[in-house]
């Protein structure tokens, strides 16, 4: 088995990065250093922790142009959008820093004569973060920043598609003066990743990835009695009610479906439109999608880059072909997108109608530039269809009637409910999923709960 990691750029199929995979000795050194550093880091004041972390954010943002270029070549995001991930990293990290002192403060109990009582939030120890390639900085920082602020040490294993992301984060923390061992990364194979989860030095696993990957995590840590945060797949729906602002609904859902070439766990993957707006919605959506420019990610004019690899493109093409054979109607002519070529990661966006839930494209995560639009006749029908999924990460409703929209949100099985927007993580809100979208929570004050343990103090006066 090769001991090298090779990152193949979706832009041209070239090897963009090569790295040595960590061996047993390096892994042991890393976990030993993390364990040793954690005790002293936990004893460091929250004020010093937040100051160092804020310096790291500033150091990271200062490299935004380099980071945007590297993202472009590693995972295929158009260069024009690369800086947006840096801004999102800054927003999320800065919010978690700003709320850390309050979120980690001891829980005060009502007074009881003769007693003092409080609950302290203690760090778990060493947190192992496994991050994906599609939003490589945003997904990683969701767990890394609160884990470190809470007094844990962190070991990061990033995707083989985006190894420079781990190195950039480490560079930022080192520049800020974070003590040695508090944040480290390892380039690992699938086998050594699983083995590290089983290591007795690991006290928590934060994983973002596929459902099958989440199953692997649960099997790996079974019997260890440690926690795991699992952010897994999505097939997120949007519902456009009869009273929706049509232009807003079209612009928002199409961007939510096709940004990042549709490679977002919380992107829109299925749209339900009330029959009274259906024809107009489809017409406007098709016109908007035809404005995308499919091309190389390093071209500043490109608005739709390649998907991450050819096998992913083939999977999406297979979903589309199968849906067409079952009666779906395709509205985008691939000839309008000359970069679309079978056998490459470049594929044209596609809008499908006459779809239903017997088709894989409406039930199975696509993770690519395709959207199915289905006509509905009522809120009740829309709710039933939105809930007819193994996933439940986010759901969106577009309506001018706020109360009616919230009432629908109360009935939809989802971790986050949006009204008149989609595909955005507000760091002040808990990021969580239901069903096969995973379990646990990141961001917000609640995001600190899984990265700490409660310790009760019960003091009786003499």
Image (spheres, grey):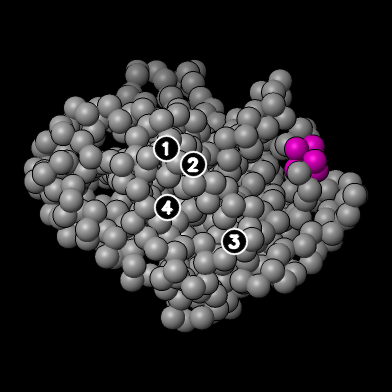
Q: How far separated are the C-alphas under marks 4 and 3?
A: 16 Å
Q: Main secondary structure of the magenta part?
A: helix
8 or 392: which is nearer to us?
Answer: 8
Cβ atoms at labels 2 and 1 below 8 Å apart: yes
Which residue is depicted at the point 23% across and 40% down?
375
Q: Closer to the N terminus: mark 4 or mark 3?
A: 3
Which numbered tag is attached to residue 322?
A: 2
Residue 134 falls within the magenta-colored stretch: no
- Separation (CA) of disc 4 from disc 1: 16 Å
Q: Residue at x 31, y 33 (%)?
A: 386
- Quarter of the image where one finds residue 410: top left
Pointer 3: what residue?
Answer: 342
Mark 1 surroundings within 10 Å by alpha-carbon count, few (fewer than 14), some (14 through 19), many (20 or more): some
Residue that badge 1 annotates: 326
Residue 171 figure quarter: bottom right
Q: Position of residue 238 (x, y in %)?
A: 29, 44
User: What kind of element bears circle 4?
Assistant: strand
Chain part drawn in magenta:
191-195
**Which tag, 3 or 1, sits closer to the chain's start?**
1
From mark 2 to mark 1, how far is it between C-alphas?
A: 6 Å
- Label disc, if present, on residue 22 of the rendered structure: none
Q: Position of residue 261 (x, y in %)?
A: 47, 60
Mark 4 Cα shell of 10 Å, populated few (<14), some (14-19), many (≥20): many
Say which label, 3 or 2, has the lower sequence index: 2
Spatial CA span between label 3 and label 2: 16 Å
Q: Is residue 227 left or right of residue 250?
A: right
Mark 4 vs mark 2: which is more N-terminal?
2
Q: Is residue 190 left or right of residue 368?
A: right
Q: Residue at x 11, y 44 (%)?
A: 276
Vertical comparison of 439 with 272: above or below = above
Residue at image mark 4: 370
């Amino acid at each position: 088995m090769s001991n090298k990691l090779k990152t193949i750029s979706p832009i041209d199929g070239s090897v963009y990065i090569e790295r040595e995979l960590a061996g047993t000795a390096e892994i042991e050194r890393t976990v030993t250093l993390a364990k040793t550093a954690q005790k002293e880091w936990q004893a460091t004041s929250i004020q010093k922790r937040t100051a160092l972390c804020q310096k790291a954010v500033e150091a990271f943002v200062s490299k935004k142009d380099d980071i945007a270029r590297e993202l472009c070549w590693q995972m295929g995001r158009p260069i024009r959008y690369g800086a947006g991930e840096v801004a999102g990293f800054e927003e999320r990290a800065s919010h978690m820093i700003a709320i850390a002192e309050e979120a980690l403060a001891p829980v005060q109990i009502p007074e009881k004569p003769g007693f003092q009582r409080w609950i302290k939030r203690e760090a778990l120890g060493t947190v192992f973060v496994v991050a994906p390639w599609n939003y490589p900085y945003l997904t990683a920082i969701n767990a890394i920043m609160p884990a470190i602020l809470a007094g844990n040490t962190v070991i990061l294993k990033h995707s083989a598609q985006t190894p420079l992301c781990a190195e950039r984060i480490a560079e930022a923390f080192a520049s800020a003066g974070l003590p040695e061992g508090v944040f480290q990364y390892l380039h690992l194979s699938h086998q050594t990743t699983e083995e590290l989860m089983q290591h007795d030095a690991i006290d928590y696993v934060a994983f973002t990835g596929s459902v099958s990957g989440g199953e692997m995590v649960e099997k790996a840590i079974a019997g260890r009695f440690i926690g795991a945060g699992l952010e897994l797949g999505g097939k997120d729906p949007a519902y456009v009610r009869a009273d929706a602002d049509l232009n807003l609904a079209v612009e928002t859902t199409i961007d939510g479906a096709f940004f990042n070439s549709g490679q977002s766990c919380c992107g829109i993957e299925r749209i339900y439109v009330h029959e009274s707006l259906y024809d107009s919605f489809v017409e406007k959506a098709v016109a908007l999608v035809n404005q995308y420019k499919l091309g190389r990610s390093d071209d500043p004019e490109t608005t739709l880059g390649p998907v991450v690899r050819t096998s992913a493109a083939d999977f999406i093409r297979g979903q589309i072909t199968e849906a067409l054979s079952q009666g779906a109607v395709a509205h985008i002519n691939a000839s309008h997108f000359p970069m679309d070529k079978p056998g490459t990661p470049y594929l044209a966006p596609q809008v499908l109608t006459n779809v239903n839930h017997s088709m894989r494209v409406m039930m199975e995560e696509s993770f690519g530039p395709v959207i199915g639009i289905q006509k509905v006749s009522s809120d009740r029908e829309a709710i039933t269809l939105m809930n007819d999924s193994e996933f439940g990460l986010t759901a969106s409703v577009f309506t001018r009637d706020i109360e009616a929209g919230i009432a629908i949100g109360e009935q939809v099985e989802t971790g986050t409910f949006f009204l008149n927007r989609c595909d955005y993580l507000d760091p002040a809100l808990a990021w969580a999923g239901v069903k096969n979208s995973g379990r646990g929570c990141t961001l917000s004050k609640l995001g600190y709960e899984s990265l700490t343990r409660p310790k009760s103090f019960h003091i009786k006066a003499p």
